[in-house]
Image (cartoon, rainbow, N blue to C red):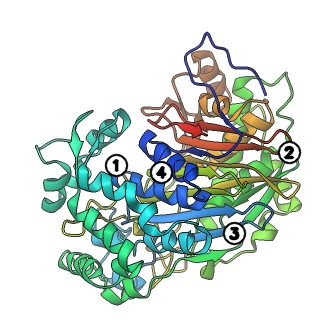
Amino acid sequence: MQQRDFFKPGRSVAVSDRGMAATSHPQATLAAVDILRAGGSAVDAAVAAVALQSVIDPHMTGIGGDCFALYSPAGGTPIALSGSGRAPQKAKLDYFLEKGFTAIPDDSPHAVTIPGAVDAWCRLIGSYGRFDMGRVLAPAIAAAEDGYCITPRVELDWSRYSDRVAKYPASAAYFLPHGRAPRIGERVTNPGLAATLKAIVKDGRDAFYRGKVAEEIAELLQSLGGLHEESDFADYKAFETVPISGKYRGRDLLECPPNGQGLAALLITRILDGFDLRDPKLTEADRIHLLAEATKAGYAKRDQLISDPDHLTFSIDELLSDRSVAAMRSQISLERAADVSIWDGPTHKDTVYVSVVDRDGNAISLINSIFFAFGSGIYAPRAGVLLQNRGAGFVVKEGHPNAIGPGKLPFHTIIPAMLMENGKTRMSFGVMGGQYQAAGHAHMLSQMLDRDLDPQQASDQPRSFCYDGKLSLEPTISEDVKLDLERRGHVTEWADAPIGGAQAIWIDHERGVLLGASDHRKDGIALGY
C-alpha cells in the first residue's frame, strides 16, 4: 500500500494489533472500543455503536428503522442477517390502485414498514454476543437520558432536512424545539427513547414489538390513515440467510441477498473485473467513465429485478454468471457513454454504517437506517421513536416484483459488505449514501485492489456517481476531467453535497495487524486498541 503524503491535509489510516471499530460518529467509535477493551465481542461493540448513533444521529438512523449485517466469525462461515421491515398485512396493492396512488408518498404513514432494527440487534446479541443487552445499550441510554452534544455534520444535515419533521406537530416539537435545528455544541436529550431502550434491556424485543411501544406506534399510524395493526409488530421477525458473492481480483465480495441492492454491487464489480484497471495508461477520466458505465448496467438490472426474496423472478446465480456478466461488459465502450435510464422511484438517502473486528478476529459489517433524512418524519413522542419510510421503496404497479403487498419486504439500498480471501475475512466495509452504496462498494474496492491504496486513502479519493441520467462529480475532480467525460457523452454536474461515507477495516493476517478508515465526509473516526 502507498505511503500517505503528509504535506497534504487528511488523516492517517488507523492501526492496531487487537481490536478496532470504525463509525461515522466519534462517540459511537469510542463506545465500540470501550466494549472491545472490556472483553466484548465484535457484535457487542457494533450494536453498542449503532444503538448510540440511533440517539445521537437521529436524522440518519434509529430504532424506528431497519438493520442488515454480515457477520464473519473467525474460522467460521459468514452469515447475513436481514432486519428489513415488512409492509402491514392490510397493505394490499388493490387498496393503493383503487385510491389512485402511483407511488407511496415518502412522508406518509403508508411509507412506514415495521421497523426491523430492534429484533435484529436482539438476535445478534443473543447468538453472537458476550455481554448482555444492558451493557450493550448503556451508552445509548446514557446519551438519551443525560444528553449529547451536536457535532458539525449532524448540525448540517439536521438543518438541511428539518422540513422533513416540520409537517408533524409532535415531530417538530421534539426535533425543532426552538423553531430550528440544534446547533453545534448544543445539548439534546430524549427521555422517551431512554425509557424504551431500558424496556428493551428488561424485556428484550417484546418491549418494542408488543405492549406500550407497539400500541402507541400503531395507534399513531392509524390516526394518520395507516394500515398498521399491533399484530404486524408482534409477528415481525428478523432472519439469518446466506450471503451472495462474486469475484473481484481473485477475492470474494460478500453481500446480503435481495431485497437489498448488494446484487448490484456484485454486478458492477464483476463487470469491472474484466478491465485492467491497473494499467498505468488509464486516466482518471477513464476510471470514472468505466465505473459509470458498469453502474448503469448494474443498476438497470437492479431496478428491474430486486424485490422481496420470496417474489424474485430470476436466478441470482444466472445473473452473476460469466456469460451474463460478459454480455453486459461487451456493451461498454471506453470512448462513448451509453444511454441512461431515468429512475422513477424515491431517492434513497440516509444511513449509518459500522465496522468492527475484535481481538479474536470476529468481524461484523453492520448498517442501520431510517431511509430518508428523518425517515417518514412521523414521531411517537412517548416512546421517543422516529419512524422510517422504507415503504416508499415499493412500486404501485401490477405485475412488478417489487409491488407493495401484505407482509412484503421492499427494495432496500442499505448494504454491508465483506471481502474474503482464501476463506478468511480480509475486509469488513461499507459505504453509506443511499442509491450510491453499490457503486461505492465497487469504487472502494478498485481504489484499494487496483491502485494499492490503504482503506483511508481509498475512502479519501474523489467520488463520482452516475445516476438518474447524470454523472455527479465531487468538486475535488478537475475541470479537465469533467470536460473529458462530457466529450464522451456524459451529462455531468458538480455534486452539491459529499457523495457517500465509508468505513472499513482491513485485516492483515500475515502480520496480525488491523488497518481502519472512516470517511472525512462525516464526523467519525476509526480507532483500535
Q: Nearer the viewer, residue 506 or 225?
A: 506
What residue sits 85% from the left and 22% below the top?
280
Q: Which residue is mark 3?
A: 79
Which numbered marker is on residue 56?
1
Q: Position of residue 227 (x, y in %)?
A: 30, 83
Q: Residue at x 56, y 64 (%)?
A: 68
> Which badge, 3 or 4, is on the more N-terminal residue?
3
Discs 1, 3 touching: Cβ within 8 Å: no
Task: Pick whichever of labels 4 and 2 is earlier in the sequence.
Answer: 2
Any part of residue 522 in sight: yes
User: Taking 362 as reference, is 295 above or below it?
Assistant: above
Judged from the image, the secondary structure of the residue bearing numbered disc 3 is strand
Q: Which mark is residue 472?
A: none
> Type of residue at label 1?
Ile
The residue wearing badge 4 is 352
* Mark sitting on residue 249: 2
Q: Which of the image's four quarters has the N terminus?
A: top right
The earlier-in-sequence mark between 1 and 3 is 1
Q: Earlier in the sequence, mark 2 or mark 3?
A: 3
Q: Position of residue 293 (x, y in %)?
A: 70, 43
**Whole-Å distance between the Cαs marked 4 and 2?**
28 Å
The residue sitting at 13% across, 48% down in the picture is 177
Label 1, label 2: how many angstroms apart (C-alpha)?
A: 38 Å
Residue type at the position of mark 4: Val
The earlier-in-sequence mark between 1 and 2 is 1
Point 67% across, 15% down: residue? 5
443 displayed left or right of 30: right
